[in-house]
């Protein structure tokens, strides 16, 4: 039986929020992540976060119940003003999971094999290295 799993770190500098996910996430872990993201969003004026960058270097997996919770959470991202989500250090299993999560969204979703690949496209974000 899983307890609350999954650790995360959040940093934001509008218009971008950065997340680092560590370990495996079950439903309780996703609930804590969702709460953390909402708290971080609440520290800025509404709709100032347009881009989300997620570092998955130490991410392991999601349980089925957490995947459903994550899909429900992202179902209303347009209301939050997200325009783009970038996943860094993604493996094929995680890519499949996150493609499913964003399947019916109009949000632009990108996948990068590592931070260097991301920074080639977004060189102005080089300061984020200090948080990873």
Image (spheres, rainbow, N blue to C red):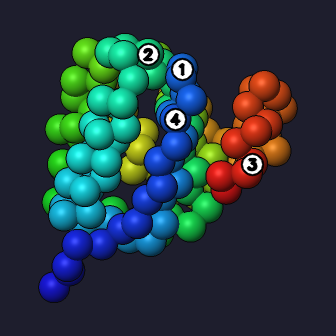
Q: Tell me the number on the disc at residue 110.
A: none
- Residue identified by numbered label 1: 15
Q: Tell me the number on the disc at residue 48.
A: 2
The reply, left or right, for residue 53 in relation to residue 103 is right
- Residue identified by numbered label 3: 129
Query: Circle 4 sits in a helix, a strand or a loop, which is it?
Result: strand
The reply, left or right, for residue 112 in relation to residue 74 is right
* Mark 2 and mark 1: Cα distance apart in space: 6 Å
* Mark 2 and mark 3: Cα distance apart in space: 22 Å
- Residue identified by numbered label 4: 12
* 55 over 60 or under it: above or below: above
* Disc with the residue nearer the chain's start (1 vs 3): 1
**Does residue 63 appear in the picture of this structure?**
no
Which one is nearer the viewer's eye here, 35 or 123?
35
* Disc with the residue nearer the chain's start (2 vs 1): 1
Residue ranking furthest to the bottom:
1
* Image-quadrant location for residue 16: top right
**Does residue 15 appear in the picture of this structure?**
yes
Q: Are marks 2 and 3 in contact (CB under 8 Å)?
A: no
């Amino acid at each position: 039986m899983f307890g609350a799993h999954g650790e995360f770190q959040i940093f934001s500098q509008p218009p971008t929020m950065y997340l680092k996910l560590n370990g495996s996430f079950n439903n309780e872990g996703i609930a804590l992540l969702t709460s953390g993201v909402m708290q971080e969003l609440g520290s800025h004026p509404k709709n100032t976060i347009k881009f989300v960058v997620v570092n998955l270097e130490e991410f392991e997996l999601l349980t089925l119940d957490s995947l459903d919770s994550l899909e429900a959470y992202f179902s209303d991202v347009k209301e939050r003003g997200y325009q783009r989500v970038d996943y860094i250090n993604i493996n094929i299993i995680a890519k499949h999971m996150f493609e499913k999560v964003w399947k019916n969204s109009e949000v632009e979703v990108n996948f990068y094999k590592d931070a260097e690949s991301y920074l080639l496209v977004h060189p102005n974000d080089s300061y984020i290295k200090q948080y990873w």
